[in-house]
Image (tube, helix red, strand yellow):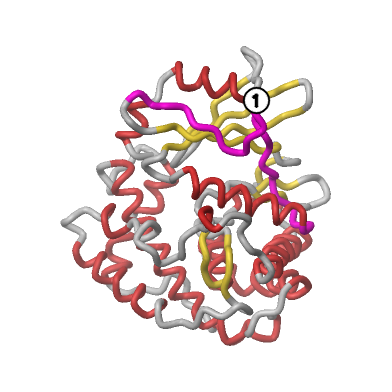
Amino acid sequence: MDPNIAARFNEAHLQAAMRLYDIPAGQIEELDGFESFIYKFLRPDGQFILRIGHSERRSPNLIWGEVDWINYLAAGGASVAKAMLSANGNLVEAVEDGQGGEFLCTAFVHAQGASMTRDRVNDRLCHNYGRLLGRMHALAKTYRVSNPAWQRYAWDSPENNTAEWQMPARENIALEKYRAVLAHLRTLPREADSYGMIHQDAHPGNFFVDDGDNLTLFDFDDCVYGHFIYDIAMVLFYTSIGEPDPADYTGRFMPVFLAGYREENQLDPAWLRELPHFMKLREIDLFAAIHFSSKDGDNPDHPWSARYMKGRRARIEGDVPFIDFDWDSLARYL
């Protein structure tokens, strides 16, 4: 989280947000949030999630665009955590921060199930993972934002191009590598059958799984207009981290995932060749984000970040593929 935003937030802001959503005292619990303050709360009508972001990071219109997209997906049968109304009947509420900005509050139905752990991964879960993403992309082809002012930006817009300002000046080589892969990806066509609203961050930390291996996706804070293959690349990027042999993992996971995806959406297999480029973009982007959040990217406090950053500079500067794999071999599954 941006340290400047974190420093502005206090108990009074939280209490104001609780009043907006009729959250009883003692029925709220803080959760781990990377870019926003996240809470779980209970009311007589169920369990919900409260997210408190800031206007310096996302404008009210952008958040309205996010919840508009989420509820469109829910109405279309995609298993996502639906946005809910405040006591005032709004999907987005603002709380003044006392310094000229606003904390922006949104609430969502709490997803069914629990976090995915590696020991419970199976083919049915991976298949359902692909189906969910495929369903979302199929719906993206017909989605039109309810209010033009709420339209989200494109994946390569300045608002989403955070590496440009998060990367430390000393990491000039990594920034050059980032700009090179970004330039390549910007040459790709943006056609309705392969481009539309995407989640952009559909990793296992952003969904719950129930006892039947059904997924419910949440945290659409990073949703953008982008290539559908970018969403798929992010799934592979995050699920492969920590695997002892990422290429072997890819060969086992992707056929099952893509078979599920194919049940809901058709995508030209030629797009598979862009997977390594989108993963490299995220690799460098995350490298910059961890530097920015920790102020010391080589020794951050967060254990996951520390593992990710180990040897990362050398891999980026040496143009080492995030996963070395024959991507065309997956074409028959898509």
Q: How many marks?
A: 1
Q: Is residue 228 above or below residue 98?
A: below
Where does the magenta region start and end? 76-98
- The residue under the point 50% across, 47% down is 61
Q: Nearer the viewer, residue 255 or 130?
A: 130
Residue placed farthest to the right in the image?
212
* Relative image position of residue 291 (x, y in whole percent): 29, 49
Q: Quadrant of residue 146?
A: bottom right
Q: Is residue 201 left or right of residue 211?
A: left
Q: Is residue 239 left or right of residue 292?
A: right
- The residue under the point 62% across, 74% down is 251
Q: Quadrant of residue 8?
A: top left
* Relative image position of residue 261 (x, y in whole percent): 71, 70
Q: Is residue 47 above or below residue 287?
A: above
Q: Is residue 185 above or below residue 67?
A: below
On the question of residue 205 being in view, the answer is no
Q: Is residue 187 left or right of residue 121?
A: left
- Confirm whether the magenta stretch covers residue 59: no
Q: Is residue 249 above or below residue 239?
A: below
Task: Specify the principal SS of the magenta part.
Answer: loop
- The residue under the point 54% across, 58% down is 148
On the question of residue 185 being in view, the answer is yes
* Relative image position of residue 304 (x, y in whole percent): 44, 46
Q: Which kind of residue does numbered mark 1 sit on?
A: Phe
- The residue under the point 46% across, 68% down is 279
Which residue, given by chain and number where applicable, does mark 1 sit on?
41
Quadrant location of the N terminus in the rendered image: top left
Quadrant location of the C terminus in the rendered image: bottom right
* Relative image position of residue 79 (x, y in whole percent): 74, 53
Circle 1 crowding by C-alpha within 10 Å: few under 14, some 14–19, many from 20: many
- Confirm whether the magenta stretch covers residue 96: yes
